[in-house]
C-alpha cells in the first residue's frame, strides 16, 4: 500500500470513530431521562443539615421522612447487614461511625431525583441509630440506573 492510501485509511478511520461517538451522544441526548422530581442532592444535604438532629428518636426520624414525603423504612443494622454487608459497613464508615455502635437505621429513598445524570437516579438517605434508639449520624448517597 502506498503512503497516500495509508494516510487516507487512517483519516477515514478517525472520522468513523468520531462520527460513531457523535451519533451515540446524539442518541443519548434524544432518549435522555428528564427527572420529574425537584429533589437534588444539594437540597437533601441542606435539609438534613438544617433539620435532622443527633439524638432524635426513631419516631422523630420517621416524622421527618413523612413530612418531606420520602419513602423510608426502619431496619436493624444486623438484618440489613446480612443482605448488604459492604453497604452498611461503608455507609457507617462514611458517616464516621463504628458499625458495632449501631442498632438500626431509617433508610429513605427519593426516586427519580435530579442529580445531574441523564439516567433515572435515586438519592438514598440513611439515619443511623445507636443502641439507645437515638440518631447518631447520617449518610447520603446517589445512584443512577445507567446502561
Image: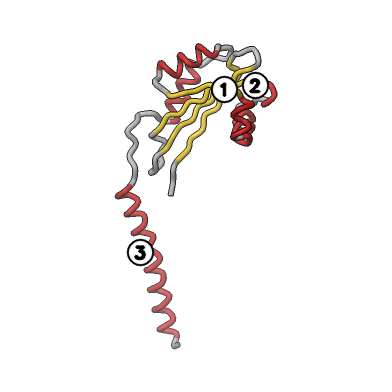
93 or 73, nearer to the observer? 73
Q: Indicate which disc, 3 or 1, sits on the residue closer to the N terminus.
A: 3
| Residue 94 visible in image | no
Residue 69 appears left or right of 82: left
Residue denoted by label 2: 102
Count residues near mark 2 (Cα–Cα under 10 Å), then give few for <14, some for 14-19, many for 20+. many
The location of residue 5, given as percent across then percent down, is 40, 83
Residue denoted by label 1: 105
The location of residue 139, given as percent across then percent down, is 55, 27
Mark 2 or mark 3, whichever is nearer to me = 2
81 or 70, nearer to the observer? 81
Rendered position, 4 above or below 34:
below
Residue, x 68% and y 21% (percent of image)?
A: 101
Residue, x 36% and y 54% (percent of image)?
A: 25
Residue denoted by label 3: 19
Name the image quarter holding residue 54. top right
Rendered position, 121 above or below 129:
below
Q: How many marks?
A: 3
The location of residue 122, given as percent across then percent down, is 44, 34
| Residue 144 visible in image | yes
Describe the element under mark 1 as helix, strand or loop: strand
For residue 72, the mark is none
Describe the element under mark 3 as helix, strand or loop: helix
Describe the element under mark 2 as helix, strand or loop: strand
Q: Are marks 2 and 1 in contact (CB under 8 Å)?
A: yes
Q: Indicate which disc, 2 or 3, sits on the residue closer to the N terminus.
A: 3
Name the image quarter holding residue 63. top left
Distance, label 2 to label 1, CA atoms, is: 8 Å
Q: Are marks 3 and 1 in contact (CB under 8 Å)?
A: no
14 or 55, nearer to the observer? 55
Amino acid at each position: 500500500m502506498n503512503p497516500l492510501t495509508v494516510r487516507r485509511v487512517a483519516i477515514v478511520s478517525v472520522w468513523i470513530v468520531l462520527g460513531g461517538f457523535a451519533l451515540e451522544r446524539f442518541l443519548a441526548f434524544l432518549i435522555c431521562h428528564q427527572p420529574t422530581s425537584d429533589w437534588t442532592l444539594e437540597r437533601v444535604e441542606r435539609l438534613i443539615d438544617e433539620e435532622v438532629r443527633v439524638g432524635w428518636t426513631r419516631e422523630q426520624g420517621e416524622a421527618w421522612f413523612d413530612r418531606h414525603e420520602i419513602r423510608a423504612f426502619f431496619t436493624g443494622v444486623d438484618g440489613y447487614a446480612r443482605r448488604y454487608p459492604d453497604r452498611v459497613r461503608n455507609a457507617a464508615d462514611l458517616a464516621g461511625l463504628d458499625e458495632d455502635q449501631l442498632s438500626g437505621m431509617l433508610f429513605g429513598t427519593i426516586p427519580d431525583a435530579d442529580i445531574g445524570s441523564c439516567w433515572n437516579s435515586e438519592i438514598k438517605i440513611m439515619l443511623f441509630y445507636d443502641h439507645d434508639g437515638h440518631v447518631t449520624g447520617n449518610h447520603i448517597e446517589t445512584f443512577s440506573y445507567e446502561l
